[in-house]
Image: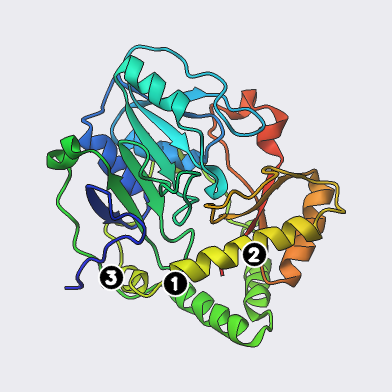
Amino acid sequence: MLLTPGLPGFTDATAIRYFSLGRHALTAGLKALAIGRGQFILMPEYICRDLLASVHAVQAEALFYPVDRSLAPQLLPAVRNVKAVLAVNYFGFPQVMEPFRAYCAEHGATLIEDNAHGFLSRDEQGTPLGSRGDFGIVSLRKTFAFPDGAALLVNQQDWIDRLPAPLPCRDDPLPAGFIAKRTLRQIQNATGFRVRSLGEKITRHFRRIRTGHAFPVSLPESEREIPGRPAIHCASLSMLKKIDTEGEVKRRRVLYQEFHRDLRHLDIEPIFADLPSGVAPYGYPFRANEFGAAAVTQIARKRGFDCFGWPDLPAAVVPVAPDFYRNVWWVNFLC
């Protein structure tokens, strides 16, 4: 059995549990809080719809709060039976936590920090993102090219006894798609030839022929079902032991600054005007129309990176979503 490694940067976490996906980690946290039917989990309208599957898994209900153009909360509704509040660090940038802490103190709710985008980021005080709430969620696979990987961080001693026992890691064969992408990625990083980008272009071509869509389409059942087994793969834990955190933070910061410089001539609006010293950006997020996004995509792909729209909004939010929820794109720094 592979010994479970510590999580770099989180030496102060009271306990850590590893999972395959952040949704499984969030579900475990909600179960530890004994949240269930007739109770609410407060989360932002601007969120990926698949996160609702964790709420569905414990038979609770999602209650949404709006965010402004800077992605800060506008209003946290005072409703009975709100048992947990989700604060999101979008794109690896620290969310301001004071409004959430005040709300939780007033209403007796638990604060969960969703740090799926910011595994290596810190706030202005040097505190790792994901450790500023009662619970934290981090996604390893969204920062590093792992087969899977996420973690539930417990930052309060009071909740330790309610946690499930650590799951043994899985050692089933790695998916062929992951192996192929990893091989192409290694060749591209070593040679500079965009073989990974070419491979993904071919994959998308055949996906479009087969399904009518170049990219995977978010389906309604993603709000109710979490795919795959909860346990993390042993290969992901093995890779976690070997990561170069300082090198990865530096790489991401340099990329952000380069894209910020090289995209200035385009008709786009960066989500964040500045890059705070502790941030390891998930990518380069911006607002644009389809023409601006296409121009950024072309530039990004020449450098071996992808550009996507984010997120697939929850079905309940789509009818009321303002335009500034709908026109966000980002260059993904995963490589």
The residue wearing badge 1 is 244
The residue wearing badge 3 is 234
Are there few (<14), some (14-19), or many (20+) residues within 10 Å of tag 3? Answer: many
- Relative to 187, residue 145 above or below: above
The amino acid type of the residue labelled 3 equals: Cys
Q: Is residue 52 left or right of residue 186?
A: left
Where is residue 326 drawn, in percent x and y? 68, 37
The answer for how far apart the CA atoms under marks 3 and 1 are is 19 Å
Q: How many marks?
A: 3
The numbered mark, 2 or 1, whose residue comes first in the sequence reads 1
Image quarter for residue 299? bottom right
Front-most of 90 and 222? Answer: 90
Q: Dot 3 lies on which element?
A: helix
Q: Residue at x 72, y 71 (%)?
A: 303
> Can you see residue 210?
no
Mark 3 or mark 2, whichever is nearer to me: 2
Image quarter for residue 107? top left
Front-most of 305 and 61? Answer: 305
